[in-house]
Amino acid sequence: MQVLSGKELNSNDKIYKPDFNTRSGRELLAFYLQTKFRQLYLYDQKQDAPVLNRVNPSFVDRFARRLINNPSRKFLIGITGESASGKSTICNEIKNVIEQFSMPVSVLSTDNYFNDISALIQKYGSFDKLRDNGYDVDAPSSFQLDTLRTDLEDLADGLDIMAPMYLPNGTGVSVPKALEIKARKIIVVEGIATMYQNIQDIFDIKIYVETENELRKNRFMTRAVEERNQSVENALKHWNYIAEAGEKYVKPFRSEADLVLNGNSDLKYFAEVLEYIYNITNNFQA
């Protein structure tokens, strides 16, 4: 990828920067990006561990039309995947690379939109007992999806929001309007709820992160036992639940994603791909 980026930066075939305030300028940018993205995809597929497992055939053209027809709207990137697939890690890498180029970015986790289940936890005695009695934690009905939809629409329109905050301490408490999220130029939204019905269509880029099940299981068990002090028995029970829930609620949306990313890919290479995308977007003659 560094070779490809070097060729781009040192090329004598740079085009003059178009006026993005005009439709013709945006159309030129869209055509340019379509060509460069196809080159990137072909290059990536020749690598031993490609980043891109799949690209939706309609993505590039649809993304180009978005740039042409609605340039003022804030840019929303949705990232989903089954538990322990690496979506949070990739989300952070995207944020880090964007910040390296001094571009304004905000990050929002849809996990903060879980329903308040504190009363149910008190009734059953613990989160684990509530789960064991049939509460479906990852079902769409377990999220404040109407609130999430409204908040994402406000962010896309340039309005700052106060998002809820779900406390990850086993109490099941959701604090309303607790997190300030700025409507910056780029907003990265991560979590399983990004691809649920009535939510997924709002994103400009929909990313699905997939990773081999055995690696996901090892990540999950290590995190549960070593970082959250869960017993191996309870961690395994919860893994079995989320594996089933992932098959039911998350995996079907793989086909709806614009990009399916390899959660096993090297983060350094992934960062280089992002940097290349930045370079081709900004590498114009003055």
Image (spheres, rainbow, N blue to C red):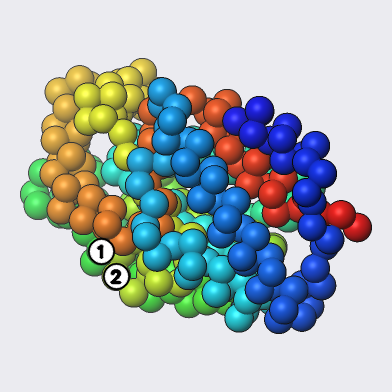
Above or below for 267 versus 93 = above
**For marks 2 and 1 on the same chain, the one whose residue lies earlier in the sequence:** 1
Above or below for 176 versus 109 = below
**Image coords of residue 64 (percent x, y):** 56, 68
Amino acid type at mark 1: Pro
Along the line of sight, which residue is nearer the eye, 164 or 218? 218
Whether residue 276 sits left or right of residue 171 in the image: it is: right
Q: Quadrant of residue 110?
A: bottom left
Residue furthest front as drawn: 13
Quadrant (top left, top right, bottom left, bottom right) of the C terminus: bottom right
Above or below for 45 versus 248 = above
Q: Secondary structure at mark 2?
A: loop
What whole-number distance in Å separates the C-alpha atoms at marks 2 and 1?
Answer: 8 Å
Along the line of sight, which residue is nearer the eye, 127 or 89? 89
* Nearer to us: label 2 or label 1: 2
Above or below for 153 versus 247 = below
**Image coords of residue 153 (percent x, y):** 52, 76
Along the line of sight, which residue is nearer the eye, 143 or 171? 143
**Image coords of residue 30 (percent x, y):** 62, 66
Residue 161 visible in rendering: no
Point 68% across, 65% down: residue? 29
- The reply to whether callout 2 and callout 1 are in contact (CB within 8 Å) is yes
Residue furthest left as drawn: 133
Point 71% across, 81% down: residue? 23
Whether residue 282 sits left or right of residue 230 in the image: it is: right
The residue indicated by pointer 2 is 197
